[in-house]
Each structure stands twice: as C-alpha cells, then as structure tokens.
Image (cartoon, grey):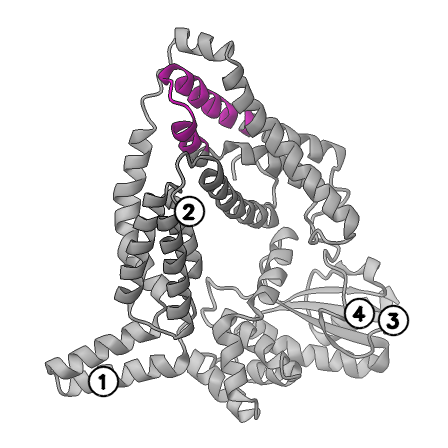
C-alpha cells in the first residue's frame, strides 16, 4: 500500500494468494528436508489420523471435540515421527470441513432459540446451543476458539524467540562479508523477483489473455520484488538449519536487509513502470474488460453495432430508475444495440446489494438472470436475505439448487471480478455507463443518464 501502484486491487489479490501457496510450499520443504531421524511407525499413525479426519468430514460429524481429539493425536504422531509437526497442523486445517451455514439449519437454530425464550429450561437451552453449533462449520468454530491464543500468545512468543538479533557495527561488518548473509539476500530479493515474474511471463505466453484486465507484467514484477519482504518462514528455517549462533545472526541480518532492499526495489520498479507506460488518458475512461459473450450478461444481438455497459447495484435507487432509461434506449435502437449488465455492490451504503448480486448469478445458473435482474430492481427496497429467497420462489426457481449455489458461493467470484474491474478503473458510483460503437471504442458516459441523453450519445458514436 505504501509503495505500490495507484490501483493495486488485483496485485493485492495476486500477492495474497501467492503468499499462502508459498508458505504451504515452504512448510512442505521443512517437512522433507529438515527431518533428521524419520520413524515410520508414528508417521503411519499420523497418516491414519489424517484419514480419520477425512472420514469424520465425509460422515458430516459436526461436533468439534471429535476433530480435536483426533487432531491432537495426529500432531503428536507427526512430532514423534521426526517430521516437523507444523506440517500436520497445515494438513489438518486443510482437511477440516468449512462451509457456509445451511439456511435450513439456521432456521432450525432460530426455532430452538425461540422455544427456549418461551420456556427457558436446561433442555431447551442445550438444544438451542447444539442447533447453533451445528449450523456453523467446525473450521470456523475452532478458528474462533484458538484465535485469541494464536494472536496474543503464539505469535508474540514466535516473535520474541526470533528476536535478539545483535546489530552493531561489528555484526553488520561480519554480515557484509558473509556469503551466507548475501545468499539469503539474493534468494529473497533476486530469487523472488526472477522466479515470480519469470513464471508468470511463461504462463502468459502459454495462455495469452490469462492476466486479468488492468493487471500487467510490470505490476507482477513490482509485486515479485515486494514478495522478498516475507520473513517469518525465513526466520523459522534459520532456526532449523543453522546451529552456530554467529552464522544464525548473519542469516537473520540478511533476512532483515533483504526486506529493506525488496521494499526499495519494488518502489523503483513501480515508478519505472509508470514512466515507461504513462497513462495516455484519464484512468477508466475506456472500458477495461472487453465485452465477452461467454462471460457477460447480454440483452440483444451479440454482434449488435452499438453497445451500452452498465455497472449497477440492485439496491441503488438511481440504478432502479435507470432501468426505465435502458428500456427506452433498447426500444429506440432495437436489434442495433446490446445491453450488458455488470455488478458493483456498494456495501457501505447498500447492505443487501452484494447478496442480491450473488442471487442474480445463482439464478443465472438456471438461465433466469434477466428475470431475477428485473425482479430485484422492481423490488429494490425489499432485498433482505429472506425477501430475496421469496423473490426466487415467486419466479419459480428450483429453490434447493438456488440455495446451494448461494451457500457454497459458486458464483461469488463473478461479482468480485466486476467489482475489481471498477476499482481498477477508479470509479465507485452507480450507475456507471460505457457507450460506443465497438468494443475498442466503449467510453465512460459522464453526465445525466436519462434516455434522451443516452440515445444522443449512441447516435454520435454511430
């Protein structure tokens, strides 16, 4: 955020994903290469423990204590096998069931809570408690249980255990002449930059167009440099790999110096990129993501000579009014225009907009996007979760399929992608329109969005 580009939305997503994968890979390396004395018996017991957790998940066991007991046994088995038990923790976390609560279970929990409020007794209290626990996944419950201990105890202890780096003129001079320290610096600064940028460039060459709109290789290079800042696993490996206090100190100094150099290098690369590719026009005035019939929701002929793209919010009253303008525009141009709708839920002012957008995508799974689109705008003042389910039922959707699509978030990324496009294009208001006579000529409309104004702009474009 301090040294990155002006619109780092997609870069943040890229680096976050990369950091998670990188840490898991590093932990796998620790397990494989830092095991001095491997004992097969305990390792097999640990593997059986992981299989038991998989089976508990398959049987939909929801009581956390069952997972806790098996997980503790698995962790101890890994520890006794000689494999670093951190790997067991990662594997257990990946296996534990995590899911959004099912609507039926939430409603059941509500019924049990109401029964307790009407007749408070121990039996109803326990039933209500179990009903709530059953609705929430084991992973989330364990996360909430352990987070205070990990955040306020484990992480501070880790930080203190890796403190004590002696930084004096003498130690800095020793580190400056240490091949170990420079190896660490080169690995984190040059290795991260070359590895991340090079791998991405190769992948883009193999799959042209795989980078999302607004995300460039120059941003990847800057992000690759900033990835050299990550030092927690590096310090962890220093503790495991180096026994000599003097050499360990050199390595830690190398990690800290690499973080500083990586920050500076990232800043330089981003500034150079801005000079080499200066913006030729106001950011976001041209449509960032071309219209794609395989992805976008389109009304009208896909090859129509005129196009209007709207970024909208189902709870926005101005977007609701704009639907009338769009109807008039489509009536005026007929088959000569295609209308494209994309999502931009404004969470700060419209608390139900995101769920409404996700609901429209769930309806699209049944080929009913535009029916849901019109129905939501017609009822933009009644978009609570319960009301949206009622709207779906009124449209005759398959409710089990609709609810499951929303519960597992099968289409949430579609809404998120549209939102990231808007953020990269530096606009945050709805409705926002792009108009033009071809994909390469779609420019942002500034000003009133009444039908007469939109028609005049389209006539000029034609």
Give the image quarter of residue 84: top left
Q: Mark 4 sits on what residue?
A: 307
Front disc: 3 or 2: 2
Separation (CA) of disc 4 from disc 3: 7 Å
Q: Earlier in the sequence, mark 4 or mark 2?
A: 2
Q: Mark 2 sits on what residue?
A: 87
Q: Mark 1 sits on what residue?
A: 114
Mark 4–mark 3 CB contact (< 8 Å): no
Residue 431 pos. (x, y %): 62, 67
The tag on residue 305 is 3
Residue 246 belongs to magenta span: yes
Q: Earlier in the sequence, mark 3 or mark 2?
A: 2
Mark 3–mark 2 CB contact (< 8 Å): no
Separation (CA) of disc 3 from disc 2: 57 Å
For label 3, count other residues whose C-alpha is less than 10 Å away and answer few (under 14), some (14-19) or many (20+): some
Residue at image location 67% in from the left, 81% down from the top: 324
Separation (CA) of disc 3 from disc 1: 58 Å
Residue 354 belongs to magenta span: no
């Amino acid at each position: 955020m301090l040294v990155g580009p002006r619109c780092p939305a997609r870069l943040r997503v890229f680096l976050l994903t990369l950091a998670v994968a990188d840490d898991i890979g590093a932990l796998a390396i620790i397990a494989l290469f830092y095991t001095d004395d491997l004992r097969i018996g305990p390792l097999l017991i640990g593997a059986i423990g992981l299989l038991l957790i998989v089976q508990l998940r398959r049987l939909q066991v929801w009581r956390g204590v069952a997972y806790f007991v098996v997980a503790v046994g698995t962790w101890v088995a890994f520890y006794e096998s000689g494999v670093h038990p951190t790997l067991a923790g990662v594997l257990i976390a990946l296996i534990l069931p995590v899911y959004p609560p099912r609507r039926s279970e939430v409603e059941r929990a509500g019924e049990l809570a109401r029964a307790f409020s009407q007749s408070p007794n121990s039996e109803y209290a326990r039933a209500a408690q179990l009903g709530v626990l059953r609705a929430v996944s084991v992973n989330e419950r364990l996360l909430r249980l352990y987070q205070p201990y990990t955040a306020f105890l484990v992480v501070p202890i880790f930080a203190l255990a890796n403190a004590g780096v002696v930084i004096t003129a003498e130690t800095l001079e020793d580190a400056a002449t240490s091949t170990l320290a420079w190896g660490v610096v080169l690995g984190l600064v040059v290795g991260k930059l070359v590895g991340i940028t090079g791998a991405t460039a190769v992948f883009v060459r193999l799959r042209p167009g795989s980078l999302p709109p607004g995300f460039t290789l120059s941003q990847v290079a800057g992000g690759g440099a900033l990835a050299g800042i990550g030092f927690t696993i590096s310090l962890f490996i220093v503790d495991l790999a180096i026994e000599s206090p003097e050499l360990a100190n050199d390595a830690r100094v190398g990690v800290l110096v690499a973080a500083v150099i990586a920050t500076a290098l990232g800043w330089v690369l981003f500034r150079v990129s801005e000079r080499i590719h200066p913006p030729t026009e106001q950011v976001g005035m041209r449509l960032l993501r071309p219209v794609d019939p395989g992805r976008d929701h389109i009304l009208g002929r896909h090859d129509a000579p005129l196009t209007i793209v709207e970024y909208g919010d189902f709870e926005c009253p101005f977007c609701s009014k704009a639907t009338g303008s769009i109807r008039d525009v489509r009536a005026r141009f007929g088959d000569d225009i295609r209308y494209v709708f994309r999502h931009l839920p404004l969470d700060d002012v419209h608390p139900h907009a995101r769920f409404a957008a996700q609901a429209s995508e769930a309806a699209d799974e049944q080929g009913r996007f535009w029916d849901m689109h019109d129905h939501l705008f017609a009822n933009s003042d009644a978009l609570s979760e319960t009301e949206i389910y009622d709207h779906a039922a009124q449209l005759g959707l398959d409710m089990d399929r609709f609810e499951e699509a929303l519960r597992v978030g099968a289409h949430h990324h579609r809404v998120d992608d549209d939102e990231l496009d808007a953020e990269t294009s530096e606009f945050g208001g709805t409705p926002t329109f792009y108009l033009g006579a071809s994909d390469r000529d779609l420019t942002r409309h500034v000003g009133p969005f009444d039908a007469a104004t939109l028609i005049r702009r389209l006539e000029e474009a034609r």
